[in-house]
Amino acid sequence: MIIYTGKGGVGKTSVAAATALRCARMGYRTIVISTDSAHSLADSLETPLSGEIRSIGNNLDAIEVDVIHEMETRWNEIGKYLSDFMVSQGLDPISSKEMTVWPGMELMSALFYIEEFQKTGRYDVVVMDTAPTAETLRLLSFPDTADWYFDKMYKIFRNTVRLARATVGKVMSIPMPTNAFLDDLEQLKERMKTVRTILLDPRTTSVRLVLNPERMVINETKRAYTYLSLYNLTVECIVVNRLLPDGARDMYPKAKYEEQSRYMQMIEESFSPLRMLKAYQASTEVVGREALEVLAEQLFDGTDPAQVYSLEKSMEIVNRDGEDTLALKLPFTSKDQVELYKSNDVLIVTVGWYKRSVTLPYSLVKKEAHKAEFKNGRLVISFK
């Protein structure tokens, strides 16, 4: 699975579509999935798409995740209960159905497609075109966060519902969750664990950051790299899109090329040694398969776009000289930006608005985290 993410407007959809086309042409059974609520994949491919998987070429399928379709098929019992609950509170049935759709369901549904594809072996390569960075970060971290909440809260919730159904539920007008609803939550919990395993395996999943040579885009991409590392996702390369072509110098002021050169130096200094893929475009619009094939050739230059560029994990737990250390990759972060808390078997790491709960192995649970320092872009926590 190749996940393309980045700031809105950097060309993620074009890059994802070009990658999928090239993979299919090389013989891989490929699907490209759009999880952005403002879909543009169909426009890029010049092919009508919907919430159903559709074959659009030899070895190539595509889907634009439709949250309403997902609610009616995958989330039927959960959606029915939430809708009934809102109707009981005075909301009309049509509005209540709309209110059962929550932000981020597109990507969550896409993650469950990934689980299905892994079980069935239906595809060799899955290319995911995601929403802009902030929403993607929240949802890619969701399996990790949900795993913690389900482990801590689900049993309490289930027992409370069963007790309430047998007591106050008999005299309340508010509908109580059904057994089918609880079964759906149980299934959701187990599927999330599977999805989490898929996401965290660098042999299975990689994230590619798409950016343009612009200061604001570079800065946001650096933050995205930090937060993806925080959640132990493997960022394997960056895609620098919309570079000015060398053969079009007469079309742009000299100052634009000088500016691009400065920003390229900033990108190389910031993201080295990550693999860098480059695309040169005189126009920001890449529409149609012929244009996408040109983009793919620029990016991959005849190489395999499905190759794994890096297996480096963002978290390592090792024992050196009798001392256990947990090293968490946090590029572009300083010690004063990080807060650490240890609660029983969980180490909570907070960077800015983002928080990760790291479940510690048994060997570290009873040890004290007594020292934290930055070494080569990693937060190294020592236990005694």
Image (spheres, rainbow, N blue to C red):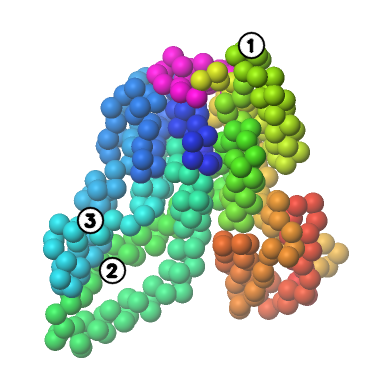
Q: Secondary structure at mark 3?
A: helix
Q: For mark 3, what is the residue?
A: 98
Above or below, comparing residue 170 to residue 234 in the picture: below
Looking at the image, residue 76 lies above or below residue 325: above
Question: Does the magenta run of residues contain 150?
Answer: no
Q: Please tell me whether the stretch drawn in magenta is mainly helix, strand or loop.
A: helix
Q: Locate residue 188 relative to residue 85 in the image: left or right.
A: right
What label sits on residue 182 in the rendered view? 2
Q: Which residue is mark 1?
A: 250
**Residue flagged by tag 2: what amino acid is it?**
Leu
Identity of the residue drawn at 33% across and 57% down:
102
Q: Are marks 2 and 3 in contact (CB under 8 Å)?
A: no
Q: Residues within 10 Å of mark 1 (few under 14, many from 20)?
A: few
Q: CA distance from mark 2 to mark 1?
A: 65 Å
> Where's residue 150, x and y in %?
43, 68
Q: Is residue 241 left or right of residue 260?
A: left
Q: Which residues are magenta?
A: 284-303
Q: Earlier in the sequence, mark 2 or mark 1?
A: 2
Q: Nearer the viewer, mark 1 or mark 3?
A: 1
Q: Is residue 287 magenta?
A: yes
Horizontal and vertical percent position of residue 50: 27, 35
Crowding around mark 3 (Cα neighbors within 10 Å: few <14, some 14 to 19, many 20+) is few
| Of the two numbered discs 2 and 3 in the rendering, the one whose residue sits closer to the viewer | 3
Residue depicted at 16% across the width and 83% down the height? 172
- Answer yes or no: is residue 3 visible: no
Circle 2 SS class:
helix
Q: Which amino acid lies under the numbered mark 3 shown in the image of this protein?
A: Glu
3D distance between C-alphas at marks 1 and 3 = 52 Å
Residue extending farthest to the right is 321
Q: Residue at x 39, y 26 (%)?
A: 44
The tag earlier along the polypeptide, 2 or 3, is 3
> Could you tell me which secondary element the residue under label 1 belongs to?
helix
